[in-house]
Image (spheres, rainbow, N blue to C red):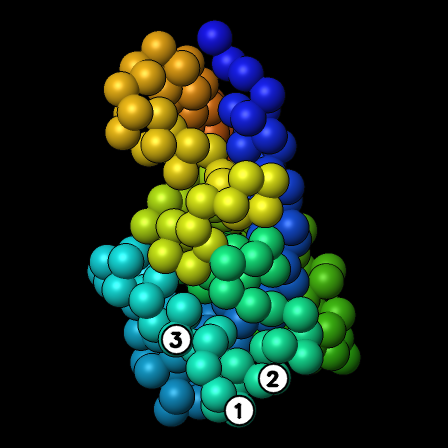
Amino acid sequence: MINDSDWQAIYLTLKLATFSSIILMIISLPLAYWLAFGRSKLKPIVSALVALPLVLPPSVLGFYLLLLMSGDHAVSKSLAVLGIYPFSFSGLILGSVVFSLPFVVQPLLASFLSISNSTLAVAATLGASRCDRFCSIILPQSKAGIVAAMILGFAHTIGEFGVVLMIGGNIPGETKVLSVQVYELVETLNYSRAGYLAGGLLIFSFVILWLTYRSFKVDNFVVMKQRESDR
């Protein structure tokens, strides 16, 4: 059965996912808006950097993040001022934000790009500023994408393993998250406890994906109804 150390790992994982999701939304909303509507020549480079965690092995990403947070250089010193160190909870947050960024930016970007340019153009001719268009048009029409981004960011953080193990290790109560706990239980041949935790993660992942697909289905239904009314 699940014991106190397992509950501690579960609590730490939920805490990490919550903090990371909040930071991810703060970063991803303006970033996705810029990628959708910006005109800079740097967009392909930024898009590639954002999507890099999708193709880069987690251990490689974790290795470079570990180098970024350690050593005697300007970046590590700047992160230290912010209280971000390797093998700490703050370090896990940084790694989780970097690793889960594309899973939050992509749904937002897809939702923003689906908005009619003519609608935004009409609002602009009526005197609406960029902030007004973002708050009154883009955000309301992107509700499903925003919900999906929040769900995927939260779920992906919970399922992280390679990155958190590289930059956080397995310090109980500090960096030992649920995925690392399952790995250690399997290593010690404690399949019973590992099975309980892994089964919980499996059910959680299924529910998260169901909610995500359901939110997009509702959004598509609303869009279809709006198009029918426009006719």
- Pointer 2 and pointer 3: residues touching (CB < 8 Å)? no
Q: Residues within 10 Å of mark 3 (few under 14, many from 20)?
A: some
Disc on the earlier residue, 2 or 3: 3
In-image side of 175 versus 139 (left or right): left
Q: CA distance from mark 3 to mark 1?
A: 12 Å
Work out whether 201 lies above or below 22. above
Residue 203: image quadrant is top left
Q: Nearer the viewer, residue 23 or 134?
A: 23
On the image, the x and y values in percent for residue 130 come to 68, 77
Q: Which amino acid type is marked by label 3?
A: Leu
Q: Residues within 10 Å of mark 1 (few under 14, many from 20)?
A: few
On the image, the x and y values in percent for residue 20 come to 58, 53
Q: Give the residue pinned by disc 2.
A: 78
Q: Give the residue pinned by disc 3.
A: 67
On the image, the x and y values in percent for residue 136 come to 73, 60
- Pointer 2 and pointer 1: residues touching (CB < 8 Å)? yes
Disc on the earlier residue, 3 or 1: 3
Say which mark, if any, is on residue 74.
Answer: 1
Say which mark, if any, is on residue 121.
Answer: none
On the image, the x and y values in percent for residue 37 come to 50, 76
Q: CA distance from mark 2 to mark 3?
A: 13 Å
Work out whether 147 lies above or below 192. below
